[in-house]
Image (cartoon, coloured by chain):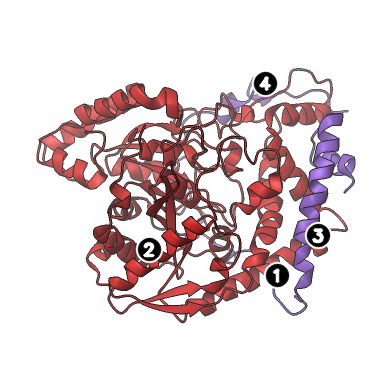
Amino acid sequence: MDIEHVAKLARLKLTDDEKERFSNQMGTIIEYIEKLNELDTKNVEPTAHVLGLNNVFREDGATPPITEKDPIEDSPAHSKGHYEVPKII
Amino acid sequence: MHRTTITQARELLQSKKLTSVQLTEAVFARIDAVEDKVKAYAHLMRDKALEQAKAADARIAKGEERPLLGVPIALKDLICAQGSRTTCASKILDQFVAPYNATVVNRLNDAGAVIVGKTNMDEFAMGSSNENSSHHATMNPWALDRVPGGSSGGSAAAVAAHECMAALGSDTGGSIRQPSAFCGVTGLKPTYGRVSRFGLVAFASSLDQIGPITKSVADAATLMNVIGGKDPQDSTSADVPLPDFTQALNQDIKGMKLGIPKEYFTSGMQPDVEKAVQEGIRTLESLGMETVEVTLPHLDYAVATYYIIACAEASTNLSRYDGVKYGHRSSKSDNLINMYENTRSEGFGEEVKRRIILGTFVLSSGYYDAYYLKGQQVRTLIKQDFENALEKCDVIAAPVTPYPAFKMGEKLDDPLQMYLADIYTISANLAGIPAMSIPCGFVGEENLPVGLQLMGKHFDESNLIAVGHKFQQATDFHTKQAPV
């Protein structure tokens, strides 16, 4: 596993120590999960969801909000009803 | 007083031999006496609980009867209760206060429960020992140098130490059943879709399920009546009728078929644990059940399948923690990307990072078919194994864990060994079936509890409750007291 590439995809910044430790552990874990290759699954349908639900629809109507509180107040940085984030461009 | 079950407490409350305030104060006195040793809670809700107890007493005085009216219950700290911290034992949610109630909390409130506090857990429910918590480790009330199991270890320890009458936990790969087995209490993972997940912080959405951890099967039936049922807020909650689970307590089990999966008894179980489980099965035979051998041939592939699917779902679910909308934000960032990276690296613990990395990898370009798709296909095979086995029997009996509670620190440096501790529990999550752990014996010099696992067909919790209750009427393992 290219640990730096995967960490970048996952938006994690790893220390050198973590990179080395995780690389070793991932090697062992991936070797273990490759035991699935012993099974022939060519004609087996994948299961994403055990109850086989497809789209679940409801009537499109107004319902009371789940909270009275303005969720933006939970943000670690906000002002005038907007989220504040560092410079993007 | 704190040692009562829900059933006993309700009788005392309703007959006015005891008030909810007295019971709640007794529970907090017990917490004050043992919590230094057990550390089952992440945080307590003392003032609010006493207000709820007073309100419950007023309702009882008016003659109201509700299944949990006045009974102190604890919640695992990934279930949202409005106005209280919900940390998931993670630094990234350390100061997060839930703005709304989970559906199960609304249902507990309607049933009159008193919420004592939020129990400790492995961070984001990832772990089997409760050692991965941003708060502190929780100790096993039966042996304080041993783990309570995980990830609902705080809930199981709190029930075992009588720091609440019962608790809710969540189970993604065994997180209710394994700690229940390690702590000598009763734990039920309902069928996937039986209990609403609305307000449950997500780990792996196709596997997660909320369920009760209690001092008896009868109490589990009471709690299931309260928390079960379709919820419009959770589209994956199933629209199937909710039976009265307490009816199953009167059900006869004579002549019912008990399936024994041979694969569960061939590899790696500690001999005294196997003996306790076998004796549990003999007890069920003596109660009139007929044992039949069944086969679950893909057991050996369950751990690998689980870690692909659970980590893949976790890596996507946990992408929401970006430091923008809520939770922790790193203060040392000068652009958006390194704000995300610093926030997540500071906020997540080691095991969570490890699973995000594994999950991101199995979903990444070039590896999706080889790992994630393959895992989903093997999941189908595991699910079919259970469908076939449960055609031949009503309930499957198996061990919960290969060994009793292990020493703290023992498996911390070897993630794969920690994952393999879940070998007997994760298949039920992959198949979506209900499964329960009940105490069936004690082993070793330290008298450590052992659990017997009962698994059933989709939405057939009633048969598990019937069998488990008859077992508890014939045995006294569930009434033994932890030495703490």
Label pair 4/3, CB-CB below 8 angstroms: no
Q: Label 1 is found on which chain of the structure?
A: B
Q: Check the rendered structure and report the hue given to chain B.
A: red
Q: Are marks 1 and 2 on the same chain?
A: yes
Name the residue type under label 1: Gln
Q: Is residue B357 above or below residue B255?
A: above
Q: Which residue is mark 1?
A: B377
Name the residue type under label 4: Ala
Q: Nearer the viewer, mark 4 or mark 2?
A: 2
Q: Earlier in the sequence, mark 1 or mark 3?
A: 3
Q: Are marks 4 and 2 on the same chain?
A: no
Q: What residue appears at the point 62 percent right and 39 percent down from the top-left corner?
A: B410
Per the rendering, the mark at residue B368 is: 3
- Secondary structure under tag 4 reads loop
Q: Quadrant of residue A70?
A: top right
Give the distance between the C-alpha atoms of the residues marked 1 and 2, in whole angstroms. Answer: 34 Å
Q: Which residue is mark 2?
A: B280
Instruction: Left or right? Give the position of B437 relative to B253.
Output: right
Per the rendering, the mark at residue A77 is: 4
Name the residue type under label 3: Tyr
Give the distance between the C-alpha atoms of the residues marked 3 and 2, in whole angstroms. Answer: 43 Å
Measured as percent of width and height from the top left, residue B272 is found at 47, 56
Chain that is purple in the image: A
Q: Is residue B296 above or below residue B194?
A: below
Q: Nearer the viewer, mark 1 or mark 2?
A: 2
- Secondary structure under tag 2 reads helix
Q: Are marks 3 and 2 on the same chain?
A: yes
